[in-house]
């Protein structure tokens, strides 16, 4: 058995499995071999469920033998973020409180993906309770960036992004409150897509969304198609109906207006190496026929909206565990929850009113421009021993999340945003661009992202870690 199938796209693999040119079991075994070879070096998949995967892969092959449709993800191995409940498979949430926790049922997202033909093989690493864009915890350890093992892979879907970059998985799910799909995709040279709230049914709070990570934009569209099935049992589920995002991804962009800003119009400090990559993307977009203008919307109030509502979320999610097990919860989570507990009803009301204002301002700006192109993260991957960034370009960060403003300001607008590979720093670290689209216009975002990907092919630059495993 070789790992050749690990280097094929998810779209190609699903097609070959559906044609019975290769079996789902064979594809699974190939990826398990890759996990065995690579995972000890990066620590991306923290719970492996090979037997579970074999059971699901055999079901896919059995359906095909009976002439049944196995689903759009036909036999594709997947590992779920360790914040998502998986029946019978350890789910720790990155917390020592839940070290040995085994859920009794799947999260609806997991059931949806399995129904679509995905083959669950385990769980991917995440920071404790998903807090922070540096993937480490005291249960499963630290996940390393495959392009430089001394650097962070980002977070909080860090394990997922690394598993993709190292070809241990063809697809992966993640979630995004303040950048947790986009930041690790950016740091690992893969694609991460934060969609409009409700596009992927997931909980109630519109700041938090679930979404796809993949190695190519086409694969991202494939996974999103499976994830974005409306679910009437989930209140936030979009009423817009199901869309096949893989259709009509090719598009002409002549005359398409794009706003581009390498430094958020001076509203944020951004590392010069990151700014250069974003600036260089302008010529690529112009080659596609786009009209690119150097301009950025006003993000006033977005910072306060996000921090207030995030603190409120943390207070609701973690106060009980902090009261019972404070010694087992990391300090940044305790601090953030305390911020939330200090809020009044009036504070929350004002934040929600301000959020509506932020959305209206962003919506108005996007009537002039179909897309907005910005940095994903304000700084390239940093040292693995550093918990979070405290300074950018000499400017001190007020809190442990301020260095993620380039992502979470977009979260506050509610607009869809994708991270797509866009280049490398002089030292070889990946840098992506963040393409922001109009509300619920995910398909258009995917179209531009694919055109950019085809023009540049930065996603084809593999980590040196892989050169002996092909």
Image (spheres, helix red, strand yellow):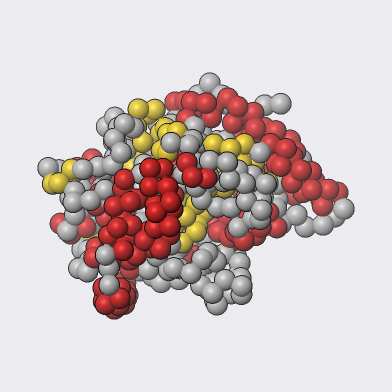
Q: State the image coordinates of residue 103 (x, y, percent, origin top left).
A: 62, 51
Residue 155 placement: quadrant? top left
Quarter occupied by the N terminus:
top right
Res. 168 image quadrant: top right
Q: Residue furthest right?
A: 66
Residue 284 placement, left or right of 232: left
Q: Nearer the viewer, residue 322 or 210?
A: 322
Image coordinates of residue 15 in percent, x first then y, are: 69, 48
Q: Position of residue 452 (x, y in %)?
A: 40, 52
- As drawn, the residue found furthest toward the front would be 324
Residue at x 60%, y 43% (from the top left corner): 90
| Residue reaching furthest to the top | 468
Using residue 34 as the reference point, say whether residue 187 is left or right of it: left
State how many labels appear.
Answer: 0
Q: Is residue 399 left or right of residue 419?
A: left
Residue at the image point whose x is 36% and y is 61% from the top: 315
Q: Is residue 254 visible?
A: no
Q: Is residue 26 above or below residue 363?
A: above
Q: Is residue 465 left or right of residue 48?
A: left
Quarter occupied by the C terminus: top right
Image height of 227 relative to 39, above or below: below
């Amino acid at each position: 058995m070789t790992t050749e199938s690990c280097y094929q796209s998810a779209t190609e693999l699903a097609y070959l499995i559906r044609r019975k040119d290769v079996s789902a079991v064979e594809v699974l075994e190939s990826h398990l071999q890759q996990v065995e070879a690579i995972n000890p070096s990066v620590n991306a998949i923290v719970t492996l469920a090979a037997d579970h995967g074999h059971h699901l892969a055999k079901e896919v092959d059995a359906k095909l033998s009976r002439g049944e449709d196995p689903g759009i993800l036909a036999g594709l191995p997947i590992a779920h973020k360790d914040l998502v409940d998986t029946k019978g498979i350890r789910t720790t949430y990155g917390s020592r409180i839940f070290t040995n926790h085994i859920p009794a049922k799947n999260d609806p997202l997991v059931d949806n993906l399995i129904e679509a033909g995905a083959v669950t093989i385990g769980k991917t690493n995440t920071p404790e309770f998903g807090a922070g864009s540096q993937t480490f915890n005291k249960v499963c350890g630290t996940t390393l960036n495959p392009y430089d093992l001394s650097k962070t892979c980002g977070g909080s879907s860090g394990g997922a992004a690394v598993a993709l970059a190292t070809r241990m998985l063809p697809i992966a799910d993640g979630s995004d409150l303040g950048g947790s799909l986009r930041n690790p995709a950016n740091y690992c040279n893969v694609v991460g897509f934060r969609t409009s709230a409700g596009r992927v049914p997931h909980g109630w709070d519109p700041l938090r969304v679930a979404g796809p990570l993949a190695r190519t934009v086409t694969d991202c569209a494939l996974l999103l198609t499976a994830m974005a099935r409306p679910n009437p049992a989930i209140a936030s589920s979009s009423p817009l109906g199901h869309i096949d995002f893989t259709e009509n991804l090719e598009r002409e962009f002549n005359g398409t207006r794009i706003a581009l800003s390498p430094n958020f119009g001076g509203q944020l400090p951004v590392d010069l190496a990151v700014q250069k990559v974003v600036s260089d993307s302008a010529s690529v977009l112009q080659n596609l026929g786009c009209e690119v203008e150097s301009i950025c919307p006003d993000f006033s109030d977005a910072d306060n909206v996000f921090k207030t509502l995030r603190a409120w979320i943390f207070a609701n999610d973690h106060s009980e565990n902090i009261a019972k097990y404070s010694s087992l919860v990391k300090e940044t989570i305790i601090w953030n929850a305390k911020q939330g507990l200090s809020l009044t009803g009036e504070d929350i009301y004002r934040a929600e009113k301000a959020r509506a204002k932020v959305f209206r301002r962003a919506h108005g700006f996007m009537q002039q421009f179909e897309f907005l192109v910005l940095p994903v993260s304000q700084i390239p991957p940093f040292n693995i021993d550093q918990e979070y960034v405290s300074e950018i370009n000499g400017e001190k960060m007020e809190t442990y999340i301020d260095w993620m403003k380039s992502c979470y300001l977009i979260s506050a607008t509610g607009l869809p945003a994708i991270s797509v590979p866009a280049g490398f720093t002089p030292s070889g670290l990946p840098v992506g661009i963040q393409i922001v689209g109009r509300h619920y216009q995910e398909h258009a975002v995917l179209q531009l992202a694919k055109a950019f990907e085809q023009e540049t092919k930065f996603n084809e630059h593999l980590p040196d870690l892989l050169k002996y495993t092909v």
